[in-house]
Amino acid sequence: MRLILGSASPRRLDLLAQLGVVPDAVRPADIDETPQPRELPRAYCARIALEKARATPCGEGEAVLCADTTVAVGRRILGKPESAGQAAEFLLLMGGRRHSVITSVVLRTAARVWQRQVVSFVKMKRLSDRELNAYLDSGEWQGKAGGYAIQGVAAGFIPWISGSHSAIMGLPLCEVAHMLDAAGLRR
């Protein structure tokens, strides 16, 4: 069976490589990721991952792996910031407090769908004006849920996590390994 990664994320490719898995193809899904009115973060994340899996073409003898990572402060979903100003708003909101990082992963074949969700908690320190502006200038916030990547410069802002580091990066490796094993895809 061929494994198709339904994501353009280079981080997800790198994480799969840690398991010794190289997808046979990469087919990023293009879906509307707008939260529904009053949609809670966990439900939103699960819905988006499943929609990505359904939107990614899956032929006979193929399995599609898709994921979504959502950052939330309470019930508020912090998506990918559209501007440096919005990234600053997100980072200031998370500063000095815990937030949740939810990653939902879906593996779909013609016959079956597996879905798992991992919730981790992250504490971000309060950023000084100098730290905030330097981070915004780096551009690292672009395309990142919540405006940061734990594996980048922002790692220096994170004194504490509880949960799965790989899930915070975008793919919960333990759960993915079990799903791939269940589907007979581990090489």
Image (cartoon, rainbow, N blue to C red):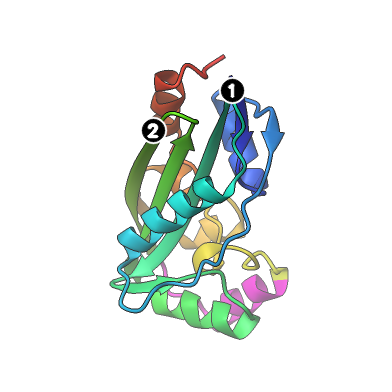
Residue 175, disc = 2
User: Would you identify the image quadrant in which residue 39 lies?
Assistant: bottom left
Evaluate whether residue 118 shows in this view. Answer: yes
User: Would you identify the image quadrant in which residue 160 lies?
Assistant: bottom left
Evaluate whether residue 162 shows in this view. Answer: no
Q: Assign the N terminus to one quadrant of the image.
A: top right
Secondary structure that dominates the magenta span: helix
* Residue bearing the label numbered 1: 61
Q: Which residues are magenta?
A: 124-137
Residue 48 lies, in percent from the top left, at 45, 57
C-alpha distance separating marks 2 and 1: 22 Å
The residue drawn where x is 49% and y is 75% is: 91
The amino acid type found where label 1 is placed reads Gly
Say left or right for 181 vs 13.
Answer: left
The answer to whether residue 134 is magenta is: yes
Residue 100 lies, in percent from the top left, at 34, 60
Residue at disc 1, secondary structure? loop
**Closer to viewer: mark 2 or mark 1:** 1
Residue 138, disc = none
Name the one closer to the observer, 123 or 52: 52
Q: Residues within 10 Å of mark 1 (few under 14, many from 20)?
A: few
Residue 176 lies, in percent from the top left, at 44, 32
